[in-house]
Image (spheres, rainbow, N blue to C red):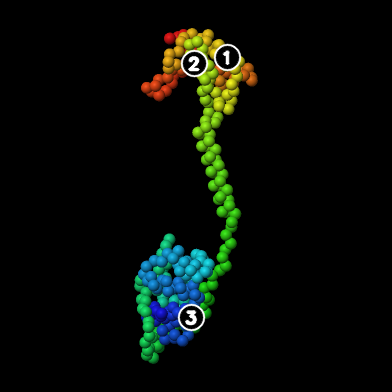
Amino acid sequence: MKYRINGHVLFDADSGSLSLMVFSDDPLAVSNPTKRLLLLLIINHGEPVSREVIFRKVWDDYGMVSSNNNLNQCVSKLRRILKTLGIEEEVIITVPKVGFMLSRDIAIECVDELPATSAMAEENIIATSLPDRLPAVEPCVAPPCNNRRPWRRWAAIGVALVLLIALAVGMTIYFTGYGRNQERFIGATDRCKVFMSTSGQAFTSQGTFNRDILSYANTKPGDCNADEYILVVRSNQVHSYISGISRLFLLKCKILREYRLEICYGLQDEQLH
């Protein structure tokens, strides 16, 4: 198939050559990717063609390496050839963030048989379009494929694994209560149930210690109602003036079910009511 561009440039899609209509015996040969690129733009005349489609139709489907560098080189060489053949208008337009298109202002005609050209027409075309000498045009050669750096992919995989592990640890801590204070039932006095609040990791069942706590709590006045209990809080956060010991706080707690909360106060405060 042959195409006439702007009335005086002939593009032979079969042989992959560009020439002036009056000098079709001396065409400028282009590379196969360049030929396929120009044909693709002509077929989609006036419509943008995305880079992805160009890569597939011009390089990938033919087992060749596609890249932005290859595409930009071919477009640049096509523009230079068409300008050399006398087309001053912008033929191939860059469509930002999409790809390229053949300008709607460029006339494209299918040519089955070349019409005869008069001598006068030849002189006019020579005088207006043909430079003194057509410069040599280098074919569009795809550069070697750039080696991708595999370590970047492995680094991304490593980061993803670290994040997954951190997420799993965080979820384990959240759902198992690791490091949070927990209340454990240690026994009951004559009047109240007694619970101890301490870290799940620090809590140890010590029979003698628990019995002493229960005995001490039993000396405190006041009975517990159904929604009350004694809470023993063991804390190392407040440092006493004697090193190496911790403190215990004895509280009486009342459950307010209608408000879904508990109110705790010191056992000695009970004497003030």
Q: Is residue 190 above or below residue 245?
A: above
> Amino acid type of disc 1?
Arg
| Local SS, label 1 | helix
Image quarter where the C terminus lies is: top left
Name the disc covering residue 211, or none.
Answer: 1
Name above or below for residue 72 compared with residue 191: below
Q: Where is residue 222 drawn, in percent x and y? A: 46, 9
Residue 231 x/y as whole percent: 50, 18
Residue at the spot of label 3? 28
Question: Residue at the spot x=39%, y=81% of the render?
Answer: 8
Q: Amino acid at mark 3?
A: Leu
- State the separation of the CA atoms marked 2 and 3: 101 Å
Residue density around tag 1, few if under 14, some if 14–19, many if 20 or more, within 10 Å: some
In the rendered image, residue 69, in percent from the top left (x then y), is placed at 51, 66
Amino acid of disc 2: Lys
For the residue pair 186 and 126, the one nearer the viewer reads as 186
- Above or below residue 237? Residue 81 is below
Q: Disc 2 or 3, which lies upstream in sequence?
A: 3
State the CA–CA distance, disc 3 to disc 1: 104 Å
Which one is in front in this view, the residue at disc 3 or the one at disc 1?
Answer: 1
Kind of element beneath mark 2: strand
Question: What residue sits right under mark 2 in the picture?
Answer: 193
